[in-house]
Image (cartoon, rainbow, N blue to C red):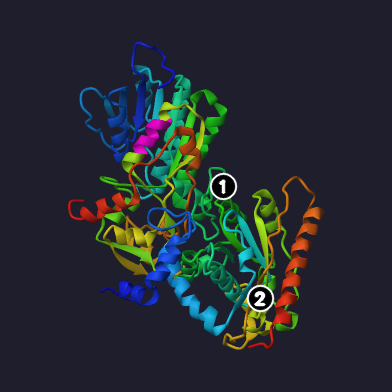
Amino acid sequence: MSLASFLKSRLIPAKLDEQINRIRKPIGSLGYDPWGFNNETFKYGFSLTKPIYEKYFRTEAHGVDHMPADGPVLIVGNHSGQLPIDGILVGYALASREKNPRIPRAMIERFFPTVPWLGNLLNGVGAALGDPLNCARMLANNEAIIVFPEGVRGSGKLYRDRYKLQRFGNGFMHLAMKYNAAIVPIGIVGCEETIPAIANIKPLAKALGVPYAPVAMPVILPAKVHLNFGPPMYFEGGDISEEQVNERVEQVKAEINRLIDKGLAERKGLF
Amino acid sequence: MNVPKNIQRKPQILITGAAGATAQRVIERLRETCDLVAVDARIQVPLGDDIPSYCIDFNHRSFEDLFRRYQFDGVIHLGRIRSSQLTRLRRYNANVLGTQKLLDLSHKYGIQRIVVLSTFHVYGAMAYNPALIDESAPMKSAGLSADLIDSVELENLANLYLWRFPELNITILRPCNIVGPSVQNTMGRLLASHRAPVLAGFSPMMQFMHIDDMADAIVLAYNKPVRGIFNVASDDWVAYQRALELSGCTRIPVPSIPPVLPRLILRTLRLQSFPAYLMEFFKYPVVIDGQAFAKEFGFQPKRPLKEIFRFYRDNKRPL
């Protein structure tokens, strides 16, 4: 038995294999899509995320059924915690839901494709370079995409700014209007406490070519995570001013704030 | 040919790059229905009594004699010298100045249809490339490697003539990796080899087109005089290292960081099948969108990826 098939037999039980195979995906004859998603890699990723989702962060997901069963969707949430743990947990919640599971895609920082192994690994489990063209193509393919419009402003913020939404980019709203995509807002509570940072060493970040260099404990704390999905929001397309787009973005932001507050009220302790 | 000058005779087509594997297949497909004249700047290719074959440098004065002797209706320009061949200067002379001469003569002698074979390399491999690049994307490769400048310049020239002389009906094709039996380009050599280098930690998405499908695409393009630039690729993708695995190649990792290290190694080794100037193509994906061509010309590749790789796996020695 080769190492690959041994690992597969240990990590991917037949039930999981079948469960992932059943999810509709626009892939080619060898299991890849144009962005590098690979069905087999995803199965490994899913299997390895399961204990992290269930045991380490003891994630509670509410309203996951708000996610439409098909069609283009943007899952828009608050970003936090230095590492994209929030994206992984949201992705797992949607891929593992009982009824109509979906494999959402994630838009990643431009820095990742330059990192050996990690870049390909992230592509393999469904992440793609955060480029508006990629996002547009995926929506045209009826995919669901996790978007954090705060970008590194959100993930790199310090602990003292936790649960304060940073400025949202408007790109996601333009894409949602153009492709008639549903926006599913999500409030993520708990990830702020996984890697609390007290400072950001900007010169070091610049020297390393990374978005930020946080001063934090070199450990990911097992904070309990609450994911609250809201009902889908629809915005009609058409030629509207940027000011009106801003207003629509503010509506989404307000809904995410409401869902964050709900999560904060629900949690009984940090861990 | 849709617009023959004389209904009594078959359309007469000049095919350049006749020694290449793609041209040979295009000739096979057209020899029954067209009068062909084959030209290659490298060697004279024996093609039988019915197809005159010449070895002529396009920049040579005698090249014009062909246009005087034959009444060409169209030109299929497949004679692009690959970046792995000759020196930069000789490639520039052949690919850029030679193509300019060909296009000038085509204009002078009233050619009504030209198909130019380019390459997806013109887009350039970058970490920031989105997937499914369409024809309107900028050609970045000239800024990334001096060895690819002639490929971009050839396209620029063809573009210029495309818009300046619409009566030439120029179609430029930008195919993905062309592979298959007797293909001697970089990717063909890699897949055919027992051991193939890879950049450690990088396995970019790639697209492959069987040479017979590519020949079909060229014939389809020639037969429908629609001007423009078109990517030619199938709706199927595979990671480079997986493609090697399926082709039965043993992967030899080359250290990939810092980036100067693999460049130094490849420049020192001077491998024809893994040249330093194509290094970025083995690191970052250049996935093109072939939808426009498929829709306009009704093109559907017939040979799946598995068949392509099976051929390479089963034919390691005879190659």
Label 2: chain? A
What residue does disc 2 label?
A: A80
What residue does disc 1 label?
A: B138
- The magenta stretch spans residue B240: no
Q: Amino acid at mark 1?
A: Pro
**Could you tell me residue B227's position as x and y percent?**
51, 30
Looking at the image, residue A142 lies above or below residue B152? below
Query: What kind of element bears circle 2?
Result: loop
Front residue (pair B272, B194): B194
Whether residue B96 is visible to the viewer of this picture, yes or no, is yes
Front residue (pair B84, B239): B239
Q: Is residue A37 left or right of residue A187?
A: left
Q: Quadrant of the N terminus of chain A?
A: bottom left
Q: How many marks?
A: 2
Q: Residues within 10 Å of mark 2 (few under 14, many from 20)?
A: many
Magenta stretch, residue numbers: B214-221
Chief SS of the magenta region: helix
- The magenta stretch spans residue B219: yes
Residue at x-position 71% and y-position 83%? A159
Q: Is residue A31 left or right of residue A179?
A: left
Front residue (pair B232, A137): A137
